Every structure is written in C-alpha cells, then in structure tokens.
Amino acid sequence: MTPATTIAPSDNEAYEAMLRTLSEGSVHVHFDPYEDIDWDSAELAIDQDDPRWRLSAHCDPLGATAWYQSLPLERQVEVGKWRMMNALRVGAAFESMLIRGLMQYAVALPNQSPEFRYCMHEMTEECNHIQMFTELVNRVGCDVPGMRRHLRVVSPFIGAALAFAPLLLMVAILAGEEPIDHYQKALLREGADLPPALLRTMEIHIAEEARHISFAGEFVRLRVPRLSRVQRAALSVLFPVVMRLAAEEIMSTPGSVARRVGIPREVCREAFWTSPASRAMMASYFGDMRAFATETGLMNRVSRRIWRRLGIDGEPSRYRGEPDRRAGLFA
C-alpha cells in the first residue's frame, strides 16, 4: 500500500498526462473574446426590450417567484437584464481574485513543473472571460456593482492569501465555477431562448471552464490522501462552507441592484434562499461537488451535517454533469 504521505509514481504520471491533455486542449480549442464574438454584427446586437432577457421560472430562483411571474413583460425584461449582468460582473470579479492566487502559486513552482504551463493557459482563458463578460455588461448598459462592497474590498487579499494554501485555492476555484456552470448548463438544457450575445458568452464559458474544473478537481483529489487526519477533517468542513459562500455571492442579487430595479426585500428573502423552491435550486448546484467530496473522503459524519446546515445537502450526482439533479433538503 502506498503511504498516505506520498504520491504513487503512477498517480503522478496520470496527473501529468492529464495536465498535458488540458494544456494541448487550451492550445487547440480556445476562444478569443474579440475574434470569436462578432460584437458589432446585427445578429449579436443588443435589444434592450428583447423578451429573451426574462428569467427562467425553472432555473432561476428569482424568476421562480410569484412576484416576478406577475410583473408585466417590460419589467420582467428590466429585472432579468440587471440580474444576469450582475451575475456576470460577479463572475468576472471572482475570476480576477482566483487569477491572483493562481499566478502567485504558479510563479513559485520549480523549473520543469508540468503545472506551470497549464496554470498559465488557465489564467489566459480567465482573462479572456473577464473581457468577454465585461464587454457584454458594457454593451447592455447596466451599471451593475458585481460583488457586494465588503467582498470587493477584501477580494485582492483573499486571492493573494490563497496562493499560500493551494488546496484551498483549488477548492475556491471549484466553488467559484460550479454554481455558474450549473446555472448556465441548466438554461441551455432547458432550451431557454436567450439573447444571442448572452448565449454565445455562455457557450464559450462552459467549454473552457470544463478544463478549469477538471484541473482543480484532480489537484485536490491527488493531494487529499497526503493530508494528516486533522488537516483532512478541517478541509472536509471548509469545503462546503466555501461552496456555500461562493454560491451566495454569485447567484444572489445584491441589495443595491434590488433597490435599483424595485425588487421588494421579502421577495429577495424568498428567492435567496428561504423558499423550498429556492433552497432546492441552491442544493442542486452542488450535486457534482457532493459526489466529489464523497469520492475523496471529504464527506464524513461531521461535514455532512455542515452541508445540511448550509442548505446544500442532497443526493450526489451519479456522473459528472448529471442533468436531473435530485438534490434534497433534510430537516
């Protein structure tokens, strides 16, 4: 049996092979926000009154509320635009925060490290995503704040600190990518009729984030067996906490935006996340991560209670990206 404090040569070889595959994928299948999106084309022109800005009643917790469903079409469009654009602005901010941590981690790697090349590819793609999201937000014209003010202030320091805790950095990457990835895939699977420019950004984001999620997941999977019992127990508790905090920031709408578009406080509370429907949506974001925690030994009696207490417990996915999430909540 391989000691828990070492990595078996076969594991290292498989990990390095995966890194080479991901790096080659970044070389041969990548997108440029200004070459691959024809922003000035008639097809992608922004129509401020396009009814396709309406929020999905099946995939979006605010869109599922009776309040939103009762609004006239023009108000649904207005609220939908501001909500979607703020989510993109938050996504861009999260990616900038994670780039800080990943850059500090990568430049400290030794020569010949196979992780260095892939990390640089990933950061290049994330920079492109930030440009892509920001271009769309600017063209739509919603002056959204993105993250809440307190997190905007501390985010540069969080990113820098995570570089010195690489496992937590990778958990944060998973937490930052999984909710928006799940939401965007759910919209596409639903066949939602989206504005073309928004649809194109989602397609590109989903395609490239698959590599980022794979890297972060394998990084954690390879290193968890090397942790001491105390370290593993601590990570098992931090894992759902980081997931929940990231989902709260990315998938909810901040008070400043709610006030700007006239969303009542009680509706915000219902949508984020007090109603049974919204809690089920929140839990559904993390079916893949519950499966991952189970596979890596990060799901135990104590951590399972944390998942439940945070409202993100439920059945794990049977396979990566399972469409029909059967996430449930337990009293």
Image (spheres, grey):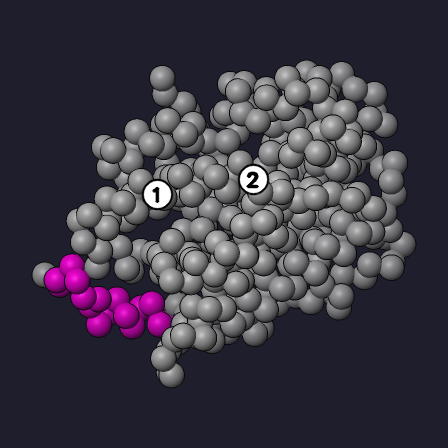
Residue at the limit of the structure toward the bottom, as seen here: 111
| Three-letter amino acid code of the residue under disc 2 | Glu
Instruction: Classify mark 2: residues with Cα within 10 Å, few (<14), some (14-19) or many (20+).
Output: some
Q: Are marks 2 and 1 in contact (CB under 8 Å)?
A: no
Task: Identify whether 120 is placed above or below 44.
Answer: below
Residue range corresponding to the magenta coloring: 2-17
Q: Which mark is residue 249?
A: 2
As rendered, which of 102 and 140 lies closer to the eye? 102
Residue 259, by quadrant, is: top right
When asked about the image quadrant of residue 37, the answer is: bottom right
Which comes sooner in the sequence, label 2 or label 1?
Answer: 1
Residue 212 visible in image: no
Q: Residue at x 61, y 52 (%)?
A: 93
Is residue 183 positioned above or below 156 on the image?
above
Residue 153 x/y as whole percent: 58, 49
x then y, percent, for residue 326: 44, 29
Q: Is residue 111 magenta?
A: no
Residue 12 falls left or right of residue 262: left
Q: Is residue 225 left or right of residue 21?
A: left
Q: Is residue 11 magenta?
A: yes
Query: x, y percentage for residue 188?
Result: 64, 42
Query: In this figure, which residue is indicated by the disc labeled 1?
Result: 238
Residue 29 position by quadrant: bottom right
Which quadrant does the C terminus fall into?
top left
Q: Residue at x 67, y 26 (%)?
A: 63
Which label is found at residue 200?
none
